[in-house]
Image: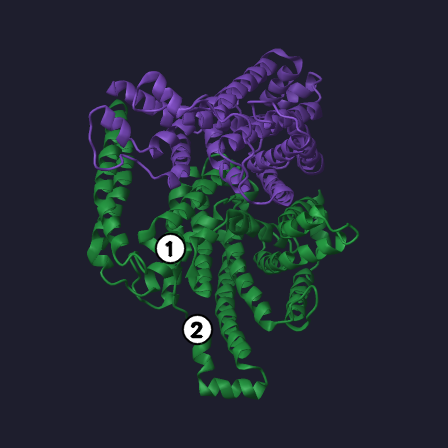
Amino acid sequence: MSNTRQAEASSRWRAPVIFLIIVALFVLEGTTRNALFSGSWNSALAILNMGLISAVMALGVNMQWGYAGLFNAGVVGFLALGALGPVLVSTPPVQGAWAAGGMRVIVALVVGLGTLALATQVWKRVAAPISFFVMPLVLLVGFVLYRYLFDPAVMAIEANNAASAGNIGGLGLPVLLAWPVGAALAAAAAWGIGKVALGLRSDYLAIATLGIGEIIVAVLRNEEWLARGVKNMSGIPRPVPYELDLQSDPDFVAKAAHWGVDIATASGIWVKLMYAGLFGLVLLALILLAELALKSPWGRMMRAIRDNETAASAMGKNIKGRHLQIFVIGSAVIGLAGAMMVTLDGLLSPGSFNPLRYTFLVWVMVIVGGSGNNWGSVLGAVLIWFLWIKAEVWGPELMSLLTAPLPDGALRTHLLESAPHMRFVAMGLVLLLVLRFAPRGLVPEK
Amino acid sequence: MDFLNAIVALLNFVVIPAAAYGAQLALGALGVTLIYGILRFSNFAHGDTMAFGTALVIIVTWGLQALGISLGPLPTALLALPIGIALCSAFVLGTDRVVYRFYRKKKSEPIILVMASVGVMFVMNGVTRLLIGVDEIRFDDGARFLIAVQDFKTWTGLNEGLALRVSQVITFVVTALACWALFRFLNRSRAGKAMRAYADNEDLALLSGIDPERVVRLTWIIATALAVTAGTLYGLDKSFKAFNYFQILLPIFAAAIVGGLGNPLGAVAGGFIVAFSEVAVTYPWKKVAAYLGFQSDGLLQLLSTEYKFAVSFVILIIVLLFRPTGLFRGKAY
């Protein structure tokens, strides 16, 4: 019942108002310098850029949750796979890496995947009692063969110039080409996991994706031949100019002088603005596509399935097939966001892929913004991202205000030191409050 | 002699650690499975309940140590455990009151409850960080070994040593007691029977005059007690680090699903299955193989230890593919 009442209460001004609030927050961050805001446009634009990427992630999650009601608890994994795209496609090639064992690794991976495919076929086609013996045998032989091919090749690649490279290297192609590759990698993983876990109880998908997320991150951390593992992969090329090049460009120096901004700040802002434009374009294109899809017969079918699976199934819709489709598409969008993220950072650091930050925070964004509504999740993403970043500053400020009456001592120091952790509590509370009192989010689905 | 050495190495590096880890997983999975059976959702906050409860136990332990109270050779944490359980249960009952009860009354989809548990997870995670920080903490005191490697070697004259840590023995004893008490409670007591009836058929249980809120409260308390015990044992055995407790969520879910969600016996079996597979797959078998007469250049390790979560995941996938209801057919107690 509460749903209908809320639908009546929500006016069409909600989205613009929230948009204006977000704009106001960013303007404050850019112009005012006090305890709450930094007063630096560089900082405001940095938050905005990551906010736009978060918005792409939120769009992906919203497709899965808002359109189809699928709980993906492994966002971090699909994001990490997407982030692998630029590393494999656009970083410069490593001298001698392919000669050391590139082909052998590829053959090993093909053997590995082929073993799985063969085992599946054996299971499907061979009659029951025989397949019980044949399938494990296929898996065993395949695994031994895979390790036989894989291990020496990896050793050779990692030994190749281990101090500064030791990885397979990229293809040296433009980084924008790597974005769809990142999306495709994430989509492939999503297809595999969806094939297994969809069509079962709804929590099973959540648990299975939680697992695949952990595993993908573990692979990125440990497989040094792939992307140098925890040694981090830096020097991912940029689609925009470097600050240093701008600073030595006479035209740009003249322009900066004309605007009356010092050259370091101006170059930083200019680069960030270009990134913001690029990400904004991608985001707008995705929203356009998503809106068109949602308003098409396909979108109506998806929502019909979400709202009543049994009825949709009775109408002849293939529930599992549609779910798999939307799960793959959503994960591809998340992968795209991952590729965009490493392009922005110029760095892939698998050590920083934390599920709380990348999976569950994105969920908070979608739920707060309004699940099922693309604009809602985008606005929610930018807003929550802004609050998440600023809460790191605001938490200690608030804590020092609250603890001001306390005498200086161990308790006060402990409280002050642990104040940055307050944002986890704050995000959890925001999620719970929205889920309870405004389950359709700030900008509800129409 | 070599054969005996092989057996000792196997016991020391595989059987004992895996059994201890399995017991800890079993306790965790029991909590997950009970909540699934009664409240009908997968509780994502379970790992952080373990972390939060263990953090409370550690703080109480520090308090007791400051007062000069100890258990001699046993860790002081055992004394702190009941207090930790009581405090953590109070917190969890609070979350049920302000969060889950609303959705239960509304009969929301299970996935909404899962989402709410993610919110609770965030809050608990933050509170744990506020309380105790994110660093690794060791809080075991008292004796460390029941059997030390050197002593074992001199007793038996074998090359291989066997170590049995106090924390491992405590894990076995406490887990055995907890399981015995739980199954006795579920099978014999009136309240336990009410819980099983409610899990089997909610409406019928309501008709027979079972108070649903009481059943739910009991479930939360039991699940929390099991979670805090599991967390404390895990912390005593390895060390306390809040993030590890989040990561242990996956093996726990895998264990609960392998055994059949909602089936306590299955959860215990699942815990041991997951733990033994994890340790067996990530253990380098070179040494054992050498004692048995197979010399090998490689480590004979199927998977490096960094991928131990992959083992629980593969088990999970196999079960989902071939027997989604789990080995013991979920929801059948």
Residue at x 53% of width, y 65% of height: A49
- The colour applied to the residues of chain B in this rendering is purple
Report the residue marked by disc 1. A184
Along the horizontal axis of the image, is B269 left or right of A47? left
Of residues B303 and B154, which is closer to you in this image?
B154
Along the horizontal axis of the image, is B35 left or right of A316? right
Along the horizontal axis of the image, is B134 left or right of B8? right
Secondary structure state at the residue bearing disc 1: helix
Residue B227 point in image, percent of width and height: 57, 29
Of residues B243 and B13, which is closer to you in this image?
B13
Report the residue marked by disc 2. A240
Of residues B14 and B122, which is closer to you in this image?
B14
Eyeballing the image, is A14 above or below A270?
above
Amino acid type, callout 1: Ala
Residue B219 point in image, percent of width and height: 63, 25
Eyeballing the image, is A113 above or below A230?
above
Amino acid type, callout 2: Val
Question: Which corner quadrant holds the N terminus of chain B?
Answer: top left
Residue situated furthest top in the rendering: B188
Inter-mark Cα distance, 2 to 1: 23 Å
Q: Is residue A317 visible?
A: no
| Residue density around tag 2, few if under 14, some if 14–19, many if 20 or more, within 10 Å | some
Disc number for residue A341: none
| Residue density around tag 1, few if under 14, some if 14–19, many if 20 or more, within 10 Å | many
